[in-house]
Amino acid sequence: MEQELAFQTLKDKLCNAHVLALPYGPEDFVVYCDASGIGLGCVLMQGGKVIAYASRQLKIHEKNYTTHDLELGAVVFALKIWRHYLYRTNSIRYHPGKVNVVAGALSRKERVKPKIVRAMNMTLQSCIKDRILTAHKEATSETIEKKSQIKDRLMVARDCQKSYADKRRKPLEFSVGDYVLLKVLPWKGVVRFGKKWKLAPINVGPFDIVSLWPIG
């Protein structure tokens, strides 16, 4: 309830007041800082008008700091980002929590906690991993199905060619006195090309058949 009230007060001041005014050199700057167990907040003001504001979440090791160290950390945080405005300014005063409303609201503003972010990342990673695996399985099954279809079509085409060749094929029969051509072995053609720089013919002959021997 207290955090919600502080946030609504901050919202009202930022939306209704003349905020983020341009700084005017001669007037002094006032910085309001506050720290909580969630983060650090600070507001830079001049003449009762907000010039700038900033906040950040506590780091992991900073969550072990004492309240005093966190408040000093808020001061250091403000001095680092607004040191060009605060040059030669050395007056630091403590304000009770009720007075320091704006900086307190900035320091207590809820953000996405690291555990929630980690859980979201793990959930997203799990979902993405499952989707990748599902898509991979679908693509693999589709590829296997296409390969099977192509293989079946090739088998059908080969069977058709084989049946046609079996019908049209005639057994070779030779008789004494026939002339035949002999096929040249591939390595002999390579040897001939290396010696004479000419390609050997595929077939040589014709040769006359002088006798026949039964096979087997």
Image: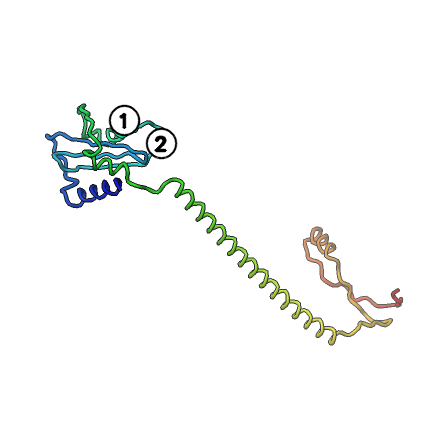
Mark seen at residue 63:
2
Q: x and y percent of residue 69 in the render?
A: 30, 26
Q: Residue at x 20, y 27 (%)?
A: 94
Q: x and y percent of residue 161 in the render?
A: 68, 71
Mark seen at residue 35:
none
- The residue furthest left is 26
Kind of residue indicated by mark 2: Lys
Q: Where on the picture, by quarter, is residue 37? A: top left
Kind of residue indicated by mark 1: Leu
Question: Residues under labels 2 and 1: Cα distance?
Answer: 14 Å
Nearest the viewer among 29 and 110 is 110
Cβ atoms under marks 2 and 1 closer than 8 Å: no
Q: x and y percent of residue 18 in the render?
A: 13, 42
Q: Name the residue tied to disc 1.
A: 72
Q: Is residue 139 left or right of residue 192?
A: left
Local packing at callout 1 (Cα closer than 10 Å; few below 14, some 14-19, many 20+) is some
Nearest the viewer among 45 and 82 is 45
